[in-house]
């Protein structure tokens, strides 16, 4: 819920959002537009979404560009990233890791230099070390991340923010770690999409039965992008308190089998599980108790509702992903 404290925080404020045309960014942009913020979106995608928003096409790996676009801004939301399947990041690690580290380093440093009042950096569940339930207070940076290249890239940015806090006493740059996020504007490219957009792309292709990788047993925390965007918005207002970062997710574990069954309620289709294929970790679920306490985070979109919204968007915009920057070509 957006209260008056949040409304007053953003009214007529200059806000920059990187990745504002993406999965979470478009939801955040819409929310801030409704709060009467003056928004600048930076993206490599050659399309705009919201009216009354300034869209700039530019590369965040260019430090001069980062300094230019962050000048005179009040708040910053750094969501820009590179989203791909685990398989793709393993096969093409440099295409993922190098530009992501450069983007994060440059944008965060530009925000520091230009004295941005508050910033939220969107990290990832993949920055965690291997576990079943992820809790902020139990995190240890000395253990390697379970998503090796993506996880290290995200951790580099997290450590940059923690270093700013230690050396420059900057305590207004915050970090969130979202779970498996899905929703309108996701990457639906079958070659490197995540579980939900990959499934939807296969359903739309009308090839039957639909092949689902694995045996359906892995459990994931699927979080709707609108809920995550609201959590990010609240993080900028309320901060992360004693935590280096906050978890954002649904807080509920759902098996791939249950996911497919729920999707089948949205649009009926025949399917089978290809059990001998790689299916990743057995369980990855966020503990969101800290976010509920610190920022009054309340994800309320059910899986079925979120899938329905996403599917209806996808069948109307099923080629939009082709207009997005692809780092893996």
Image (cartoon, grey):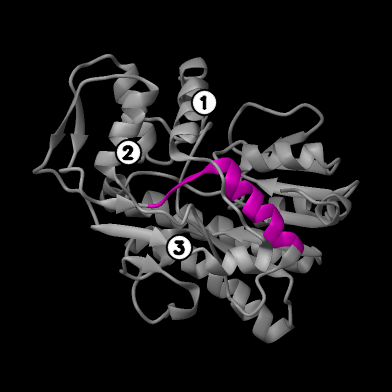
- SS label for mark 2: helix
Mark 3 / mark 2, whichever is N-terminal: 3
Question: Which of the pair 5/147 is nearer the observer?
Answer: 5
Q: Where is residue 257 drawn, in percent x and y?
A: 24, 40
Please say if the residues under marks 1 and 2 sit with CB atoms less than 8 Å apart.
Answer: no
Badge 1: few (under 14), some or many (20 or more) residues near its Cα, within 10 Å? few
Where is residue 162 drawn, in percent x and y?
A: 60, 77
Q: Which mark, residue 298?
A: none
Q: Secondary structure at mark 3?
A: helix
Mark 1 / mark 2, whichever is N-terminal: 2
**Dot 1 or dot 3, earlier in sequence:** 3
Q: Is residue 223 above or below residue 46?
A: below
Quickly name the residue at label 3: 153
C-alpha span from label 3 to label 2:
29 Å
What residue do we see at 29% from left, 32% from top? Answer: 261
Q: Is residue 131 visible?
A: yes
188 or 93: which is nearer to us? 188
Q: Is residue 260 left or right of residue 235?
A: left
Rendered-image quadrant of the C terminus = top left
* Left or right: where 40 falls relative to 202: right
**Residue 235 drawn at (x, y percent):** 68, 61
Badge nearest the viewer, 3 or 2? 2
Check the image and name the residue furthest to the bottom: 167
- Residue for badge 2: 259
CB contact under 8 Å: marks 1 and 3:
no
Q: Which residues are magenta?
A: 221-237
Q: Is residue 233 magenta?
A: yes
Say which mark, if any, is on residue 323: 1
Out of 67 and 166, give the one closest to the viewer.
166
Q: Is residue 82 found inside the magenta-colored segment of the image? A: no
> Which residue lies at the image location 38% right of the left edge and 44% below the top edge?
84
In three-dimensional space, the C-alpha distance between marks 1 and 3, rounded to whole angstroms, equals 25 Å
């Amino acid at each position: 819920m957006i209260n008056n404290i949040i409304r007053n925080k953003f009214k007529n404020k200059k806000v920059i959002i990187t990745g504002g045309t993406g999965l979470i960014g478009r939801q955040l942009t819409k929310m801030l537009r409704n709060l009467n913020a003056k928004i600048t979106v930076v993206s490599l995608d050659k399309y705009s979404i919201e009216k009354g928003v300034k869209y700039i096409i530019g590369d965040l790996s260019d430090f001069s560009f980062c300094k230019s676009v962050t000048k005179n801004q009040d708040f910053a939301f750094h969501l820009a990233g590179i989203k791909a399947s685990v398989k793709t990041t393993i096969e093409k690690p440099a295409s993922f890791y190098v530009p992501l580290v450069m983007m994060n380093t440059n944008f965060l440093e530009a925000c520091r230099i230009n004295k941005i009042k508050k910033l939220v950096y969107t990290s990832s569940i993949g920055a965690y070390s291997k576990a079943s339930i992820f809790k902020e207070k139990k995190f240890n940076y000395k253990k390697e991340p379970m998503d090796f290249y993506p996880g290290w890239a995200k951790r580099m940015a997290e450590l940059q923010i923690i270093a700013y806090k230690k050396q420059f006493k900057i305590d207004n740059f915050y970090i969130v770690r979202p779970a498996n996020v899905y929703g309108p504007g996701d990457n639906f490219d079958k070659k490197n999409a995540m579980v939900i957009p990959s499934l939807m792309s296969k359903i739309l292709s009308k090839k039957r039965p639909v092949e689902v990788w694995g045996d359906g047993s892995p459990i994931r925390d699927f979080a709707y992008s609108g809920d995550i965007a609201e959590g990010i918005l609240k993080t900028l207002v309320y901060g992360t308190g004693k935590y280096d970062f906050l978890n954002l997710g649904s807080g509920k574990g759902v098996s791939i089998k249950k996911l497919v069954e729920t999707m089948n309620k949205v649009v009926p289709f025949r399917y089978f599980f290809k059990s001998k294929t790689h299916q990743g970790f057995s369980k990855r679920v966020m503990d969101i108790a800290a976010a509920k306490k610190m920022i009054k985070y309340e994800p309320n979109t059910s899986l079925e509702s979120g899938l329905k919204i996403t599917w209806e968007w996808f069948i109307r915009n099923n080629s939009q992903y082709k207009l997005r920057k692809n780092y893996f070509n």
